[in-house]
Image (tube, rainbow, N blue to C red):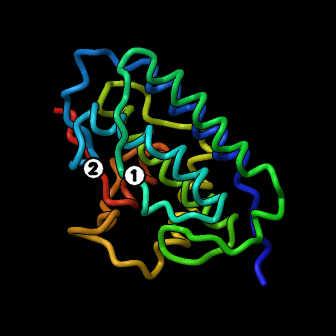
Amino acid sequence: MDQISDFRPDLDTAQTWVADLISAVRPDQLDSPTPCTEYDVRGLLQHISALPAKVTAVAAGGNRRELPPQVAIDEEGVGERYREEAAAALGAWGDDALLTTTLTAPWGPAPGGAALGGFVMETVAHGWDLAVATGQDPEADPALAAKAHAIGERALAEAPRGSGMPFGTPVEAPAGAGPTTRLAAFLGRSWDRG
């Protein structure tokens, strides 16, 4: 049996990076498009802000799909509010036994550690979406991005991808792309800044 990884420190790093990105969003950028084509920046912030409740729900044995994909946000202080909620959600994973307990991941029953890895990948991917949409540095810590990419390769190895699916078919990353941009390309994201 594979050893279950402890992705809690990685999720903490990803959430901290994303909180900083959120805090740097300007009000005049809220209606701008994002590489996550179903959302503009405001919608993406509402989606990212829904993630902490989902992280908490999975730790408690719930199903993240029963929670809304977006939540209302107060555009003043949204980054700090996300930071607080993300820290509380991570705190729900304090018991090491959760890493090996079978919980409900988005793709079905899985060890908690694997479900937590899915949140790492999703958080990093949406951080990239937000960063490129708002003109910020889209590269997370390289080790974090590489880990998120490895999680994605394993989790999506046989998953359906493309139209109507959460992740598109892989696209070619731009020449010289960093690891976070390569992750985004693997997840089917592309972005023409022109």
Tell me what residue is drawn at x 60 percent, y 42 percent.
Answer: 142
Tell me what residue is drawn at x 76 percent, y 63 percent.
Answer: 98
User: Along the horizontal axis of the image, is 4 left or right of 50?
Assistant: right
**Number of disc labels:** 2
Which labelled disc corresponds to residue 150?
none
Q: Please determine whether, in this image, residue 105 is positioned above or below residue 179.
A: below
Reading the chain from its start, which is encountered first: label 2 or label 1? 1
Helix, strand or loop at label 1? It is helix
Marks 1 and 2: in contact by CB < 8 Å? yes
User: Along the horizontal axis of the image, is 134 left or right of 38?
Assistant: right
> Residue 65, position in %: x, y?
43, 63
> Residue 125, position in %: x, y?
44, 48
Tell me what residue is drawn at x 57 percent, y 28 percent.
Answer: 83
- Residue type for callout 1: Ala
- Residue type for callout 2: Ser
Q: Please determine whether, in this image, residue 163 is positioned above or below residue 11.
A: below
User: Along the horizontal axis of the image, is 158 left or right of 38?
Assistant: right
Q: Report, in whole angstroms, how far the alpha carbon at label 2 lies from the one at label 1.
A: 7 Å
Q: Quadrant of residue 131?
A: top left
Mark 2, other Cα within 10 Å: few <14 / some 14–19 / many ≥20 = many
Pick the front one: 124 or 40: 40
Q: Please determine whether, in this image, residue 73 is positioned above or below residue 129.
A: above
Which labelled disc corresponds to residue 190?
2
Quarter of the rendering occupied by the C terminus: top left
Pick the front one: 46 or 188: 46
Tell me what residue is drawn at x 48 percent, y 43 percent.
Answer: 178
Quarter of the rendering occupied by the N terminus: bottom right
Which labelled disc corresponds to residue 184?
1
User: Along the horizontal axis of the image, is 4 left or right of 177?
Assistant: right
> Residue 187, position in %: x, y?
38, 60
Mark 1, other Cα within 10 Å: few <14 / some 14–19 / many ≥20 = many
